[in-house]
Image: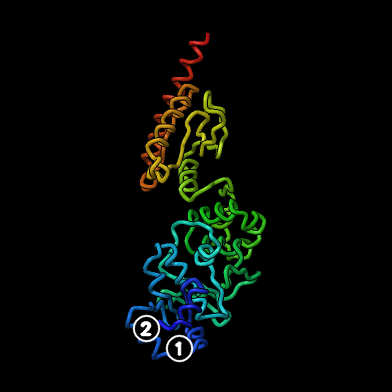
Amino acid sequence: MDDRLEVMARSQFGAFGSPDAARVGVSPDELTTRIRRREVHRVRRGAYVLASIHDSADVDERYRMRIRAVLCSRPEDRASHQSALVMLGIHTYGVDFGVVEVESRSVGRRRKSNRLVTNPWTYGDTWRNERYAMVAPARACVQVAATSGFMAAVCAMDSALHLGRCTREEIRHAALTLPPIHRTIALRALEASDPRAESVGETRTRIVLRDAGFTVESQVELQVPGAGSRRVDFVVDGCVIVEFDGLVKYQNADGKHNLADEKARETRLSQMGYEVVRVIWSDLESPQSIIREIRQRRALAKERRRAMRATIR
């Protein structure tokens, strides 16, 4: 690997374009040789990533590298939609991570070619992260509403608001510039958003619960006897605690200890009259099972509370 090419690419988080290669004296033929040697991966024409960084990266980082490579090859464009969200560290769900989305002044309508979607340039400020340009966070959120629908938009808006990347008013203003059918979806998503959500899993769980007609309070602080203040993800209908649990905290060296602590806290919460339901990623694929369990636990909690009141009398 040419030292100048590697230094330049690493300074750009492993991504570069044809203009970058030319700038450090690497000809198209030399670049082709490096691709054949598998030192470089070609993302698309004119856009490349270093194989050594790409191959050791996780799926999310590989997508970011593809975005960077495309932007290096198209310096007049800016990332949009889910590509902008990823570059800004904003989480979402249900979008197409198989394509890179950009805005360009060179097109008059949306075009898709070879895993690149090129959109007409929209109004608004250009944000920069690292050296790369993208639409503003609020604009990216409503773009996702237009292309990927309600759930994707709520997940993006929750994350953007929680991280302080934008305000509700900025999202509303961006939504009002959309065509009517997309504007409706974006505004509905904004109404359903909650900046207290800490993960996509929490957002999806909350929407399932509300769609099922439950009364849902998010991020509730409870005073637990013997355990002090405890924040729970959701209190449903005043008597069922719902926790979204990615299980990560139970998979490290202290996992068994953490799990034991959780069980002890659940016992104390039961003594207060609550039932606890834990939701994991796979449960979200069958929301009816979540709804059934919560209804059953709600009945148990109400029965326990009646028994507790009778004992006090």
Q: Which mark is residue 253?
A: none
Task: Determine which quarter of the picture holds residue 32.
Answer: bottom left
Dot 1: few (<14), some (14–19), or many (≥20) neighbours within 10 Å? Answer: some
Dot 2: few (<14), some (14–19), or many (≥20) neighbours within 10 Å? Answer: some
Q: Amino acid at mark 1?
A: Val
The spot of residue 305 in percent (x, y) is 48, 19
Q: Residue at x 55, y 51 (%)?
A: 158
**Is residue 287 among the parts visible in the rendering?**
no
Q: CA distance from mark 2 to mark 1?
A: 10 Å
Q: Residue furthest front?
A: 3
**Is residue 122 among the parts visible in the rendering?**
yes
Mark 2 lies on residue: 34
Helix, strand or loop at mark 1: loop
Q: Residue at x 39, y 47 (%)?
A: 281
Helix, strand or loop at mark 2: helix
Q: Is residue 250 above or below residue 133?
A: above
The spot of residue 2 in percent (x, y) is 43, 83
Q: Residue furthest top?
A: 313
Task: Determine which quarter of the picture holds residue 63.
Answer: bottom left
The spot of residue 55 in percent (x, y) is 37, 69
Residues at marks 2 and 1 touching, judged by CB atoms closer than 8 Å: yes
Mark 1 lies on residue: 26
